[in-house]
Every structure is written in structure tokens, then in C-alpha cells.
Image (cartoon, rainbow, N blue to C red):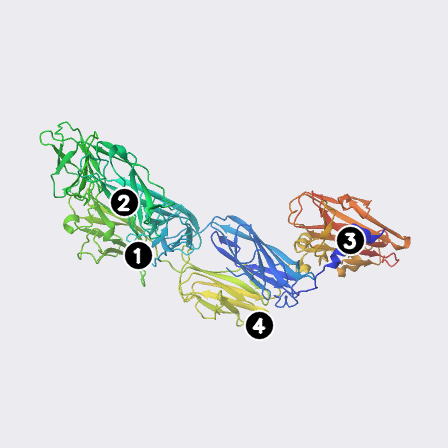
Amino acid sequence: MNFKKTALASAIALTLATGSVMATTTTVGGEFILDKATINAGGTINLALLGLDSSGAVDRFGEQQGSVIIAVVNTIKGEIVGGSTYPGATPDDPRPSSGQFTSQVRYFRLNQGNGQVSINYPVTATGTDSVTITLQERIPTTGGGVEFKTIASAERVVTINPPSSAPKALNVVEFKASALDPEKALGTTDDGIWADGITGKMTAGVAGAQIIVESENPSAAGELTVTLRKGSTSVPYTTQMQLGKAIVTLDNKVTSAGKYYIEATFKGFDGNSVDLLYPDTVEVISTGLPRSIVLSANKQRLNVNAGQGATVSATLKDEYGNTTTSRAGTAITVEVKDANTTTTGVAAFDIPVGVGASKGSYQIGVAGSSAFTKASTASLVGTALSGPNRTTVSGITASAPLAISAVEKTLVVSPLFTTAQMAGTEFKAFTVVTSDNNANVGPITIQNTTTSESLTVNRDPSTNVVQGFFKTATDGATYLISDSTGVYAQQLVDAAGIIRAAATNVELRNAHNQKVTSVYAGTIASSTDRAAYIPERSLKMFDTFGNSVTPGSPGGTGTFTASSTNSISVSYMGTGTASAGIPDLSPGGVVEVRYATVGTKAFSGTDNIALAFDKPGLGTNNITVTTNVSAPEKLTAINAYITQDKIPTNSEVALTVEILDQDGNPYPTTDVTVLFNDGLTGEGVIQNPDVRDLSGNIIATGQQLFTTAGSRKVLVVGAGAVEGTFKLTFRNPDGSVKAERTFTVASAYEGQCSTSNLSACTTQVDCESALGFFAGDKCSVRPELTSTGSVFDPTTGEVTEGTLDFFGGIYQALKAGDGFTKTAVLSCYGPNNPVSIQAAFQVDPADVGKGGEVLIVGLLTIGEFNFSGWYMMDLNNIVTWDGMSLAGLTAAKEVGELPSLYSSVLYQGQFYIGGLLNLYVGYRNPAGKVVFSSSAIQANIVNTDTCPN
């Protein structure tokens, strides 16, 4: 048959036409070293990516011939820091990036054989994670593109333990306004537990503002909730804290203007971020874009005759219903018209809202055009106008109708109190009569216009006096008097306010005005003592009705004293007297309750602080405040993490050092020293190992690990070109706590089964895992047939170049030293020279996991008989093939799920006849697509009599 006319031959020609420019690399293997294989959720692992040369050293020169070495890193449960999402498409493509130490796939470019990756694990991660790494060579092709060749691959398993969830204390440290906010307001940074708190600012409905929360424990991880609270309105946001820090990004649901308290809580932690003295707040302002008008009035019924009248107000509202000014800086006129003007006689009137104002008002029902001409009800509607031409303002909707009635009769009211009355006491308030001298007017309603508290009472029929009884204290002295039947015009009357009653209750309240029963006992600078502080301003007194009695004077609040049986001292710092404090005195001082944590008076645990008050009339004259005093932290453990101490020459690996206290929590300190080769002697000791921090600063022997207090540091340990050993020691000043790691710098292949050290692979399974072929009890390199392959499209019938690697070779017992070769000359066939023919190929990612059929095709040529024919495998049978119909190929094997790399022994045994055999392999997916090698495994079987006995 004409070989050049076959479909397979056409594909071979296509492959030869577009080959690589023969860029070569000396990088033949890889080593991938983790600092930690076990981690708490919320933590970070660091992975060194090392390209190796044939000697097992990191290959510093693997790219000098124009190749690019890329590591493809895949994690199922982690989040990869840095890297690229694309491997690059042209020879000079700068992608992927080089990475850094610090289901996702990222590409990293090695630099002189070294690469670094950090993987963060969310606090929600559990179980184990499979991190797979594939090292590839990116080779430029003659067509201007690139092709990829796999160098090595490996898997690393990471065990994920539950997060470390003890924050100790929480602090809202920063508010960052959204870049989308038209006001571009900025938050402030809270720099300590007694700082002034956060004062943020944002525009209603604008997303993107951020609130940053930190914990005292720098490794705390878990679920954190930030709640914005204004009155009865709460807007919660839940996020995850990692390494003691959480960032909440606000959405567009914060729409109601006003001042909100910011509170952070942590799942499983009995506490919050709220200080006793200084609140964390964010002020939400209106959008500054009026979208509607609201009309309101200070009374609903007035006299038809010119009398007291009523004040009608027009208020501008934004799209969320917030009172707003116009940031456009233009004055607005609200034209108010009565829909019932023909009945009421109330003419249209204007309410001006000036520049920078949000509200205007107008007096209606007095002498003039706004007076009612007869008893009737007006229906007022306001429309926004602007400019001298009184143009209707687009975008601002008219108000809803406001009903105001005029009646013929009116109440006549006289106040009877000119001095403030005490809350909860009954007093003579007003004389109420009517313009028609009606003795049976019925119940009278009295409302304080400041607090909106109202009560309904009956007149004394003999004196026309009504009694007052108010519970809410206020300075507001204006009252609205109404008859409950709605017959008479209402009257506004000025009198006096309501003062608070005597104190009957005392509470400790935080800066958000929430009742608290415990205080935090913190550390004291330059001391082992701890102290709890109770500010005078946080002790609030109330009367029976909930009115605040504090702040006040000692005559009104009395004083208090504090005591504790477990403390070493109770001090009144800046308080009113030397021995007692005044509740809620502003600015006031604090009571310091100090505890020893070492020595004979050392205390740890929960203590009760008793606060005794001498104010008569309190329901209880003392309250108990608890505080938890923890034992002093001490440096108990130093851990230095890396998963293996043997590292290749020229490599750079990550070593993570952590300092812990007795509870396993981070212990910030500067008292850890680094020593090189402490106690290590003998030949082969590397005297000056290269140790640096992540910023590239050199760490020298005898140097402190931290220049400022720290508890965790990632070091980059560099192995030079010389093999040997060195030791790193991390210790406290007296050496009672230390960690040591002794490193061996040597070839990575020594004694290890790997892609670059196949001779150490002694089983079929290990050999295949290392990407080799196994025969004759040894693992050999698998020859590459092609790095592209060919693809047959059953829809079009066309064959195009592919992008997948194919491997294959022949092993013969008489030439065991040659391993597997792509082409082989068999000088002898028969039982004394058994062979193994093996193949492997990549599967298109679109086909991985799906069913498929493995295809095997052979072209046998026997020269002495002038014979040439195509054959294919049909399961276990050899059948003929026409060499043309790729769709007619039969399956050598059916595969339930195609793996990403398929490997198989095609034939094992002896040959029975001489000739030239070319074998091609591939697979077919369920849709009929055929992917196959365009290069053959070739066996030239010579018919001689030279076989050994």
C-alpha cells in the first residue's frame, strides 16, 4: 500500500512540519519541599520548588538555552498566593510570575532553578489537602508559539487541623471608606485599648467600605461577626479571621443615615470589641441628592379664625428616606398647594429651603392668605421648584398629601407650672376651657413635643385643671393639648420641663451604653502584674423610670469604693477623692485593681470586684464586676518547621520558626537568638550557611531572630554549591528552650525514587509514579515519541496537530543496559530475547474522567517476502486495518474513566518472525474523537542465528 496516502502518514508529516526549535534544558528533575505538612486552618504553608540537574543539584543554568522552567501548582482546599493563571503563549511571554514564599491552579516560573509558593488555608478548611506539582519546560517552536514538556511531578499531602480560636481580646482598628464614596471620607486608626476609638464616615447605600478587626492573639482564626447597630436597627456582617486579623467589606445595604456603633464578636468567645469608654462608630450620611419631599405639621387641627395656627415644614429626603441637603448647592422652593382650596380658602404658599439646608417651614392658619375661611380640611401637596422661572426640579417627587383641619371651636389653655417637675410625680399642669364654655369636653391629651410622651387625663369639673404625670425627663417645655373627640382646635403651650427622680439603680455600662458585668485584666508595661480598670464614667445611675441620674455631683449620686480579696492593690487614679470615686463623673478617673502574677501573692483565675455605693435609695448598694486574670505568658517552646532536612545543593527552602507560650499560643518576644553549627564539629561542616528573612536581610550567627517583639518568622535557607552539613539553633537567653535543625546538603537523588532518580525505584508502582517504564526488575526512562500527537475530528474528518505528550519504547532482555528505546534493533528473536513494549500518553483534560477506548495500530513490513500491512488490536485479537479509516479502528481496551496520564504494557513476550514493526498508540473518546501518536515505536527484528542458548 502507499504509505504516504494513509491518514496516519498524513499526521506524521504534519508533526514534522512544525517542530520545536530544539531548545534544551539541563533540568531533568524536581524536588518540592514544604515547611509544614500539618497546619491549623487559617494558617499558611510555604513550598520550595526546585528544578534539578542530572547530578541532583538545583540547576542554576536550566534556562540558558532559551527554555523556561514552569511549576504548575494545584491545591484543592488552599488559596495560592501569587503566581499566574496562564503559563504563557509565546517564547518571550513574561507569564507566569516567579511567585513568593507566603480547587486553585497557578503557574510559577523558576529563577535559576528555585521557586517559592505560599498557600493559605481558610479557617473553614478541614481534613487533608492534596497539593500537586508538575515541573514543565516551556519550549519555543518554529511557528512562534510554545510547547510544553513534563520534567517531573509530585504530590504533597497537607493535614489541616481545626483553627486556633482564642482571640483573647478584639479591637476594631480601622475604618476605610469606599473608593466609590463621593465624599471619600476616611476612617481613623485605633492604636490601643484606651484609644479614642474609631470614627468612620460613609455615604448611605455605597458599597466597599472596610472595617478591620484585630485580636490580641496574633494567630487567632475563626468566624467573626461585625455588627453595625443604630437603635433597634442591626446590620451584621460575617467573615473569617485569619492570623489575628479580619476585614469586613460593607455592601450597599447600609442605607439609613445616622451614627452606628461598630461591634465585633467572635464565635465561641465570650466577649466583644467594645471599650468601656470610647465607642467605635461610623456616621452614615445622606446621599446629598434630594429625591422626595415630606410635608409635616406641628398640629392637625387649628382655629378657622386667625389664631395660633400651625407650622408646616417641608423636608428634603434622599432615595432611602434620609433627611438630606442638596450637595448641588442650589436653593429649592417648595410650592405648597391645597387641593381643596375652593372649600378652605387656603391659597398656595412657598416654603424656601436655602442652600445647605434640608428643611424649611411656613406658618399656616394665621391672618392672611393662608387662613382658613371656614371649617374644612386642607389637603396640602408640596412640589420642588428652582430658579426665577420656578422650574419643576426633575428627580424630586412631590410630597404625599398632608391633611390639616380647621374647626370653629378651640381649646383655651393656661399653664400652671413654671418650674420643672420630678418624673413620676403628679402635679397640677394646665387649666383647660373651651371657646364655647363646654363643661363636658371629655378627656384631654397632653403630649410633650420633645419626647412625644403623652397621657390622657380628665379635667377637674370644678376647677377645669388637668393633672400631669410624666416619666421621661426632658428640658423640653412645650406641650400639645388636644381633646380626645377631635372637636376643638389643638393648642401648643410653653411651661416647664421634667427632671429625673432619685437614683434607684446603678449599672456598669460600656461605650455603646450596654450593660456589662465583667472587665478586661490586661498587662502592664515593664511589669508582670495585670490590672483591671473601671472608669468612673462607665458607672451609670438611673431612676425608677430609666432616666439617667448621672453625671451629677456627690450630693446626687453619692460615692463608691472598690474592693477585691485577690488583688494586691486598689487605687483611685484621678478620682474625686483619695478614697472613693464619683459615678459617671466627666472626665473622671479610673479605679485600678492590680494583680500579681508571680510571687507569693500571685493570682490567676476569675476575681470578683465589689463596688459599694453610699447613695441612699438605691435598690441595691453594691454590684459585683468580674475579671479574668490569666497567668503570665512565658516562652515555653520554639518550633522550627521543615518537612525534610536533606536539601539539594544550590537550593532555597523555607524554614518557619514559631515561638509559643505554655498554652501553645504565640509568644511575642525579642529573646530568641540564632546560632550556626552550635556544637557541630568534624569534616564537611558548612561554616556560613545562607539564612535570610523574606525581605532578603541576612541573618548572622548570634543575631536576635526578632528586632521587635515577634512570634513567627519565615526564613529562606540557602544551600550553596558545596555538599556538607550545617545546624541552625534557635534558643532563649539561658538555653533552656531551644529548637535545632541539622541540614544535609547533597544530591536530591541519593537513595530516593523520583523522576530524576529512577534507579531507586524498585517496583512497578513506584516506577510508574516516577514517570518511568519498568522491566527486567529495573525502572528506565520512558522515551518521548512526540510532544504534540494528532487529533482526528469525526465531524469534519480532518486530522490536526495536538498538544499532548506521547511516550513509548521497547526493552529487550539481551540489551537490558539500554533500558527502553524508541527504536530498537533486535538481532535475535525468540524465547532467549523476550521484550517489553510499553507506552504512556497524556489525555486531553476535556476527556479526563470520561469513558474511552485505547487504540493500538501496527505497520508490519517483511522485506524478504515483499510484504507490508496494517494491523490493529481488537481486544485480545489482531485484525487487519485498511490504514485509512480512523473511525473504523477497533478498541484494544475499554477504559471506564480516562486518567490524566495513561500508561500500559502493550506487549510482553517474544517475537516469532523477523521484519520491521511500527506501533502507534492513542485513544478514542465517546464522541469519536481519536487522539494518537504521530511517531511510532519501531522494532527492527533481524532474522539471524546469533541468539545465545
Of the two numbered discs 3 and 4 in the rendering, the one whose residue sits closer to the viewer: 3
Of the two numbered discs 1 and 3 in the rendering, the one whose residue sits closer to the viewer: 3
Of the two numbered discs 2 and 3 in the rendering, the one whose residue sits closer to the viewer: 2
Q: Quadrant of residue 506?
A: top left
Q: Badge 2 local density, few (<14 within 10 Å), some, or many (20+)?
A: many
Is 895 placed above or below 153 here?
above
Q: Confirm or deny contact between disc 1 and disc 2 (CB under 8 A).
A: no
Residue hosting label 3: 10
Instruction: Say what secondary structure mark 2 lies in.
Output: strand
Considering every residue shown, the one lying at the far left of the view is 462
Residue hosting label 1: 196
Of the two numbered discs 2 and 4 in the rendering, the one whose residue sits closer to the viewer: 2
- Alpha carbon of mark 3 to alpha carbon of mark 4: how far? 63 Å
The answer to whether 461 appears left or right of 537 in the picture is left
Residue 441 screen position, x and y as percent? 16, 29
Residue hosting label 2: 351
Q: Confirm or deny contact between disc 4 and disc 1 (CB under 8 A).
A: no
Q: Amino acid at mark 4?
A: Glu
Q: Earlier in the sequence, mark 1 or mark 2?
A: 1
Q: Badge 3 local density, few (<14 within 10 Å), some, or many (20+)?
A: some
Q: Earlier in the sequence, mark 2 or mark 3?
A: 3
Q: Earlier in the sequence, mark 2 or mark 4?
A: 2
Q: Looking at the figure, which quarter contains the C terminus?
A: bottom right
Residue 267 in view, yes or no:
no
Residue hosting label 4: 683
Instruction: Say what secondary structure mark 1 lies in.
Output: loop
837, 856: nearer the viewer = 856
Instruction: Say what secondary structure mark 4 lies in.
Output: loop
